[in-house]
Image (cartoon, rainbow, N blue to C red):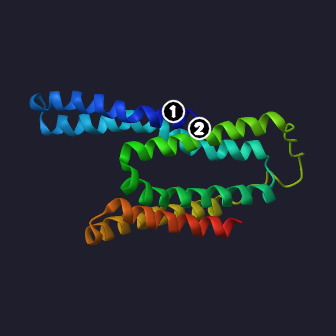
Amino acid sequence: AAIALYALLLPSLLHAASGGIENGAAQLTIFQWYGALAGTSLFLLTLPAFAMGAGFPLMLAAVGNRAERLSGVYGLNTLGASCGALLPLWLLPVLGWGNAVRVVAGVGILVALAFMAISQRSAAVAEVPEGDGGSMRPPVMTLLAYAGIGASSLILEIGWTRLFGMVMLRTEYVLAIILATFLLGIGIGSI
């Protein structure tokens, strides 16, 4: 809900920030200009992006640390993310940026309200007993290999976005399709 509310405020924040940066552009060197742009972007996007990334581990903690639940929740989350990657392909041209953000923020608020209602009706999740294997950790080399696969996948996504963006001249569409396909594979493989 907080991320959705922030998304509703973001157009106003961007407008205020761009006005300040444009006013200072005449007095800034090129390096100061890039620094101001980078600093503003980091300031406006770091906290909500971090919160979005933290949402999934919080959901896993809510459903309990059982393997049969984890893979299903991960798969559903990733399938939802795949749909979310494709939604802008339809929303942006039909509604425009501002209205598309309002629709997505509205959906986010509705989902948050639904989760609040569900959580009030459900019983507390039982803790996983010690010794049932829920806390076993894979070997470090396996974890490092898994991290390498994730890093390689994202490197390829960025490279493909750059390559096909030059050909198709619409980077956001290329990114949406590559990301949705990647997430779809993860989601289907997890369920």
Residue closer to the observer: 108 or 26: 108
Q: Residue pushed farthest front?
A: 94
Percent x, y for residue 119? Answer: 77, 37
Q: Quadrant of the C terminus?
A: bottom right
Percent x, y for residue 65? Answer: 79, 49
Percent x, y for residue 86? Answer: 48, 61
Provide the secondary structure element on which disc 1 rests: helix
Provide the secondary structure element on which disc 2 rests: helix
Residue placed under numbered mark 1 in the picture: 5
Identify the image quadrant of residue 68: bottom right
Bin the neighbour count of mark 2 within 10 Å (Cα to Cα): few under 14, some 14-19, many 20 and up: some
Residue located at (48% from left, 33% from top): 6
Q: Quadrant of the N terminus?
A: top right
Residue located at (65% from left, 69% from top): 188
Residue closer to the observer: 84 or 162: 84
Specify whether 17 is left or right of 87. Answer: left
Bin the neighbour count of mark 1 within 10 Å (Cα to Cα): few under 14, some 14-19, many 20 and up: some
Residue closer to the observer: 88 or 77: 88
**Mark 2 residue type:** Ile
Specify whether 62 is left or right of 188. Answer: right
Specify whether 2 is left or right of 27. Answer: right
Residue located at (43% from left, 62% from top): 176
| N-term-proximal mark, 1 vs 2 | 1
Q: Residue pushed farthest left?
A: 26
Say if residue 131 shows up in the picture.
yes
Percent x, y for residue 133? Answer: 85, 55
Residue placed under numbered mark 2 in the picture: 109
Q: Work out how far the residue at label 1 is from the one at label 2, CA to CA, in angstroms.
A: 8 Å
Label for residue 31? none
Residues at circles 1 and 2 in contact by the CB criterion of under 8 Å: yes
Vertically, is 76 above or below 19?
A: below
**Mark 1 residue type:** Leu
